[in-house]
Amino acid sequence: EPEVTQTPSHQVTQMGQEVILRCVPISNHLYFYWYRQILGQKVEFLVSFYNNEISEKSEIFDDQFSVERPDGSNFTLKIRSTKLEDSAMYFCASLLRGPLNIQYFGAGTRLSVL
Amino acid sequence: SQQGEEDPQALSIQEGENATMNCSYKTSINNLQWYRQNSGRGLVHLILIRSNEREKHSGRLRVTLDTSKKSSSLLITASRAADTASYFCATKGSGGGADGLTFGKGTHLIIQP
């Protein structure tokens, strides 16, 4: 069964460093998403991406964040200068536009900012 | 309360019993979905119910939706130890486009063997 894959599973970084989280969405999907989940809290929407541009973004997705689909298969989330409060699980999801409208999630990347 | 609030926050039952979790939301929706998350793992989609549907079944899962009360319930029948997980409802707004999902805080379900 096709699945969304995310790498790495765990990323440790120093405060102020840049990180890139990688995702390979399901191959024929058209919409891509990033969410985050701070430990013990609910999953929060960050950004959606369609047709090579951002469709929607939340208040969390400030200038420190950017997304890119560099090569038609990968979908990346970059955090330019990480802060302690960026520590969270980051989930990628993809969706094939259609009547079911189900977003399929990857297993997540745990980001630890020290 | 916030969009997509589940209750109870935690539920512990015996294996074989039924588990019921509730979710409330505030804005108009296109659909409502339930996801499961095992500890430290990703989100697994369970079931989707559209705003014009009132009830849906999938295996041991039964979901209801009451748009007049802006609420939904997830029933898991004949629970098993493997059902131990956190369960989240997530709503998709009616605005169309590539809307992100709005998740609730989740119900942590523990099935005692």
Image (tube, coloured by chain):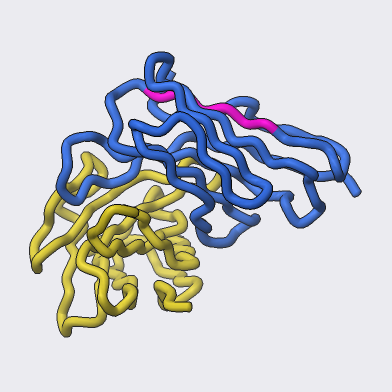
Chain colours: A yellow, B blue
Q: Is residue A38 left or right of residue B92?
A: right
How many marks the image carries: the answer is 0
Residue at x-position 31% and y-position 70% = A19
The one nearer the camera, A34 or B23, is: B23
How far across and down, in percent of the image, does residue A52 sit?
Answer: 9, 68
Q: Is residue B22 left or right of residue A111?
A: right
Residue at x-position 46% and y-position 70% = A12
Q: Assess whether residue A114 is covered by the magenta stretch.
A: no
Q: Is residue A6 left or right of residue B23?
A: left
Would you say residue A3 is visible in this rendering? yes
Tell me: residue A68, above or below residue B39.
below
| Location of the N terminus of chain B (image quadrant) | top left
How far across and down, in percent of the image, does residue B68 sit?
Answer: 38, 15
Q: Residue pushed farthest top?
A: B69
How far across and down, in percent of the image, does residue B91 sit?
Answer: 37, 37
The one nearer the camera, A79 or B91, is: B91
Residue at x-position 31% and y-position 40% = B92
Name the dominant secondary structure of the magenta segment: strand
Tell me: residue A48, above or below residue A25.
above
How far across and down, in percent of the image, does residue A40 sit?
Answer: 56, 43
Q: Is residue A16 left or right of residue A55?
A: right
Residue at x-position 46% and y-position 35% = B104
Q: Residue pushed farthest right?
A: B113
Q: Assess whether residue B21 is covered by the magenta stretch.
A: yes
* Range covered by the magenta-colored residues: B20-25
Would you say residue A22 is visible in this rendering? no
Q: Quadrant of residue A14?
A: bottom left
Q: Quadrant of residue A88?
A: bottom left
The one nearer the camera, A8 or A27, is: A27
Tell me: residue B7, above or below residue A96.
above
